[in-house]
Amino acid sequence: MDPNRVLIFDTTLRDGEQSPGASMNLAEKLQVAHALDELCVDIIEAGFPIASPGDFESVREIARQVQRPIICGLARCNAGDIDRVAEALRGHPHGRIHVFLATSAIHREFKLRMAKEEIIRRAVDGVKRAKDHGFEVEFSPEDAARTELDFLAEVVERTIEVGATTVNIPDTVGYAVPSQYANAISHLKKHVSNIEKAIISVHCHNDLGMAVANTLAALEQGARQVECTINGLGERAGNCALEEIVMALRTRQDYFALDTAIQTKKLYTTSRLVSHVTGIVVQRNKAIVGQNAFAHEAGIHQDGMLKERSTYEIMNPEDVGVPKTELVLGKHSGRHALKQRILDLSYHLTEAQLEKVYDGFKVLADRKKTIYNADIEALCENQIHLTELQAEAQSNTWTLEAVACNAGSATIPSAVVCLWHQDGSVVRDCSIGDGPIDAVFQAIERITGVNVVLQDYRLRSVTIGEDAQGEAHVEVEHEGRTLTGRAVSTDVIEASAMAFLQVINRVLRTKGLGRILPTETLEN
């Protein structure tokens, strides 16, 4: 391997999905996996197969469909976890089993209740079992950043001895600072006798806002794999953001002298895709992919930009896939132009879905003077969503027939909702609320008999102008489970009702079949 080459290990589909409210279904995970493939990440951590049947199926299907990168599955150091990953990866030409076990004193004492000797024995046994399946093996000493350095070196050396070809040194709780983290990597390079037989990987959380800084510090000391996520998704404050670490290395190549294989012009569209499928909006001032990342409002900045771009921009927006101008399409545009733009936006649609998007595009073009990128994205997202809903349709209990609201400053907000039941009956009911949306939600709850706790409700314009499409995002809690729904319509009341009804149907369909979470932590 080129000593100046940094491997990008993307864990958006595993650690990123553990962000509250960021769960993805199989179709959404496949969309993201294909986008990561096009982005040219080296390794995709597709999930934690033992966690649930859904996670197992996702890893297996991604391994079947995405062949170029290494596909990885996470496992604790026990036979059941490891064998489950091997089963999910069976047949993939570049499979990897990622086994982990906590090593810090606080985890040994309070979580595992194990002595150092038992930790080493279990780690060695886990790596051996994974190696016996014929796949690459990566080992992570969980909470490595708070582990005694001499013990950390001993665990790493022993796991390399029995077949680990990548050793990941995670800052599991985002506790490290750059100099301390760099010192840990330097210590391993000096004190692990067989360290040259393995690639040192780093996995930094962002609890103190230093995930990228810690990662860069580790790379300076010889780490050559970075575990990261799109948009920095992940547990609590998230992980090292893929787009930030990649562009830091590219922009400051003069300092780091390190390269990745990432196709950076795909960063922006991949970020948008992940934001759409998870419902987690990218903050405006987010580095690299935020809406303001290449915006200049201050007069002195604008003056400098007009004279010489590099006075206030250290990157070209085109280098990360941010277009200088929006794509303008109209009602006279043909299928080919639309299809090409859909591919440019990193959407993978079937011919049937493309035809539906084209039909929707023509209808929208008759109503709007200008069609923007965001309009095309909304049409694609809506069609993907409709395809998913159609797949669920046989098990859907309720379908929205009609909704009407009455609201104003001098009246009590009320709503009338008409739903179709799967038995063929049509049920109508009305309700009052604090506002029209609240009234709609209460009417749906009265009809379906399902009561949920609304955790989050967001409306956003997916395009600009008075005739913009609106996307409703609903997050609810029901019996300890978090479920999300989203819908797009030019009528925000209708979009809200459809999104809320979607989560109601999911409650009815999955009630009592919760995600099986292992007793140990799922993060690194």
Image (spheres, rainbow, N blue to C red):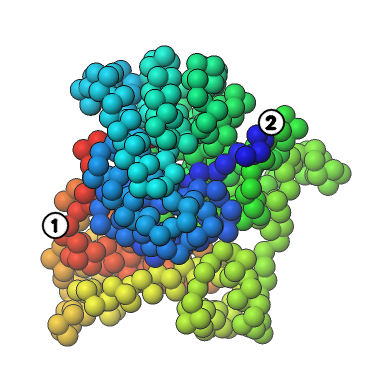
Q: Earlier in the sequence, mark 1 or mark 2?
A: 2
Name the spot of residue 472 as percent of width and height, x first: 39, 62
Label drawn at residue 333? none
Q: Height in image: 334 above or below 229?
A: below
Q: Height in image: 225 above or below 424?
A: above
At 33% across and 51% down in the image, what residue appears? 86
Within-10-Å neighbours for mark 1: few <14, some 14–19, many 20+: few
At 71% across and 39% down in the image, what residue appears? 251
Q: Quadrant of the C terminus?
A: top left
At 29% across and 79% down in the image, what residue appears? 402
Q: Nearer the viewer, residue 4 or 439?
A: 4
Q: How many angstroms separate mark 1 from mark 2 (CA)?
A: 51 Å
Three-letter amino acid code of the residue under disc 2: Phe
Residue 76 horizontal side relative to residue 44, left or right: left
The residue that mark 1 highlights is 512
The residue that mark 2 highlights is 256
At 62% across and 49% down in the image, what residue appears? 262
Three-letter amino acid code of the residue under disc 1: Gly
